Image (cartoon, rainbow, N blue to C red):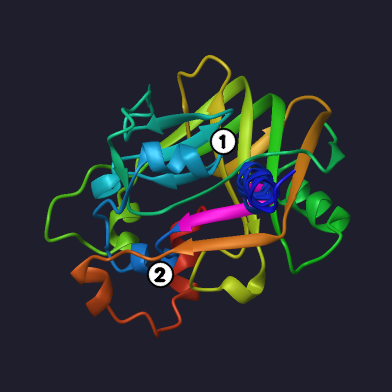
Amino acid sequence: MCFDCKLSRLFVFFTCFLPACLVAGTVTQWSTIDALLEGLYDGVATLGELREAGDFGLGTFHRLDGEMVVLDGTVYQIDSAGRVHLPDDSLTTPFAAVAFFETDYRIIIPAGSSLKELEALIDEAAPSANYFYGIRINGEFELVRTRSVPLQEKPYPLLIKVVADQPVFEIKKTTGTLVGLWCPEFVKGINVTGHHFHYIDDERSSGGHVLAVETATDMIAEVAILRNFNLRLPELRTFREVSLGTDRSAELEAVETEQ
């Protein structure tokens, strides 16, 4: 075989396999959580771009129009009335994080577990506090308490003001999936450190950002170890000019948890 032909075959080999290597175990994220806290709600990536980077994850939508669940390659939008929609790929997101989910290990979550209790079990089983983790828990719940933020108009208010009037839903005796991302402490200000869960029921009729849960039966938490992090920062003028040097931990805690 000629030398040029060998080079050609080698090039084909690497172009076929390199993208898969880069994608496996990788979290791809658009913008930062602190930018979202500052009211940067304009979309920076289409849902089509999002689905090319992962089949599992969470985020929100242009103008902060509801909560996002990405599960098995489908993007779901839970609006401020708690309804679930299948948005078009042309819709955009100001903040989202996705990965291709491959289970690395499983954890038993006992019946009657609260959100804090199941989070503690996941933390205890984690091989390191320095990786990212995708967490998928499907089963029957006595209760899932969720919220979803409403569509905003410019000038956008800060996120802490948006969630002050957020609609909260009590989803009782439901079967569905918790879609979670665990982020290490060193990405403080970039993403939510620790656990962040969204929920969607099996009927695709309800869900949202998770505030509380109570499991009805024993269930399995599937965990994917994500050792790579790909951050895509917006090119928007608003992002270039915003100040992101302030510690917003207390603000984020108020936004993410039940008060």
Q: Is residue 59 in the magenta section?
A: no
Element at badge 2?
helix
Image spot of residue 89 (x, y percent): 33, 32
Residue 17 in view: yes
Pick out the residue farthest to the top.
203
Other-residue count near label 2 (Cα within 10 Å), few / some / many at <14 / 14–19 / ≥20: many
- The residue under label 2 is 34
Element at badge 1?
loop
Image height check: is 250 above or below 65? below
Contact (Cβ within 8 Å) of mark 2 with mark 1: no
Residue drawn at (23%, 79%) of the image: 241
Stretch in magenta: 23-29
Q: Amino acid at mark 1?
A: Asp
Q: Amino acid at mark 2?
A: Asp
Residue drawn at (65%, 73%) of the image: 185
Looking at this view, is 92 or 4 the one in front?
A: 4
Looking at the image, residue 72 sits to the left or right of residue 77; the answer is: right
Marks 2 and 1, Cα distance to the nearest angstrom? 24 Å
Residue 55 - label: 1
User: How many numbered circles does the render carry?
Assistant: 2
Residue drawn at (63%, 76%) of the image: 186
